[in-house]
Amino acid sequence: NAGVTQTPKFRILKIGQSMTLQCTQDMNHNYMYWYRQDPGMGLKLIYYSVGAGITDKGEVPNGYNVSRSTTEDFPLRLELAAPSQTSVYFCASATGGNQETQYFGPGTRLLVL
Amino acid sequence: GENVEQHPSTLSVQEGDSAVIKCTYSDSASNYFPWYKQELGKRPQLIIDIRSNVGEKKDQRIAVTLNKTAKHFSLHITETQPEDSAVYFCAASIEGGGADGLTFGKGTHLIIQP
């Protein structure tokens, strides 16, 4: 199993541009999450999904959108990139709910200039 | 919502000594407390976790203790080695509170001095 994979690894965006961060897992996990990690900080939850067709907001959802059309994929969309969205983005998945181990992807480093 | 405080932000210990990282949480309903290790430029990886029906859990040189009354939990690493150098994050979540992910502390940068 590849586990959780993310693309791209690194991206530079101009202010106002849009992009989609891809996340795929091959472990048949129902639960998937998007976190962002700012320098010297912990991870903050952006959006999460408990299964295909179901998504919900986390702590810091503004400026982002997600979709979950399949169990495997959970893309994160930035519509109008802002410098405040410069961060490292991690996708994670888990078999069940809050007491299940979350497995993280390798991360996408995003720089908005 | 839940708030997790983690201390210290940086911890430097001599190789072979023990390291202790402490976290407090605010929501008494939290009942799952994982610890993640993150090496520079890498993804967070689970190293140990504890659930609220257990007070202590050990895995070789790593142990976690939980005090639900005081709402704090700690990570203990004994006989530290150079490969233990990393950033460690504590986290908390609530069973039955929706699958709304983990609330993380801000991390502790552990430095093992040779």
Image (cartoon, coloured by chain):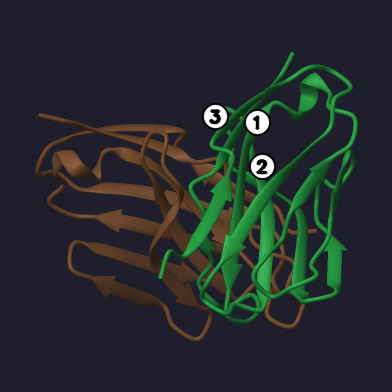
Using the image, tell me which numbered label, if any, was put on residue A36: 2
Q: Is residue A23 above or below residue A102?
A: above
Quadrant of the image for the C terminus of chain B? top left
Q: How far is mark 3 from mark 2, CA to CA?
A: 12 Å
Residue at mark 3 shares a chain with residue at mark 1: yes
Q: Which chain is brown?
A: B
Q: Which residue is mark 1?
A: A87
Q: How far is mark 1 from mark 2, CA to CA?
A: 6 Å
Toward the top, the furthest residue is A113
> Where is residue B69, by image quadrant?
bottom right
Q: Position of residue A74 (x, y in %)?
A: 71, 61
Q: How far is mark 3 from mark 1, CA to CA?
A: 11 Å
Does residue A92 appear left or right of residue B95 in this picture?
left
Toward the bottom, the furthest residue is B53
Single out the mark in the foreground, 3 or 2. Answer: 2
Q: Is residue B103 above or below residue A49?
A: above
Q: Which residue is mark 3?
A: A40
Name which of mark 1 and mark 2 comes first in the sequence: 2
The numbered mark 3 sits on a residue in which chain?
A
The reply to whether residue B1 is in sight is yes
> Where is residue A33, by image quadrant?
bottom right
Query: Does the CB distance between marks 1 and 2 fall below 8 Å?
Result: yes
Q: Amino acid at mark 1?
A: Ser
Q: Which chain is green?
A: A
Using the image, tell me which numbered label, if any, was put on residue A11: none
Identity of the residue drawn at 20% across and 48% down: B18
Q: For the residue labelled by badge 3, is the local secondary structure a helix, a strand or a loop? A: loop
Name which of mark 3 and mark 1 comes first in the sequence: 3
Residue at mark 3 shares a chain with residue at mark 2: yes
Identity of the residue drawn at 89% across and 36% down: A79
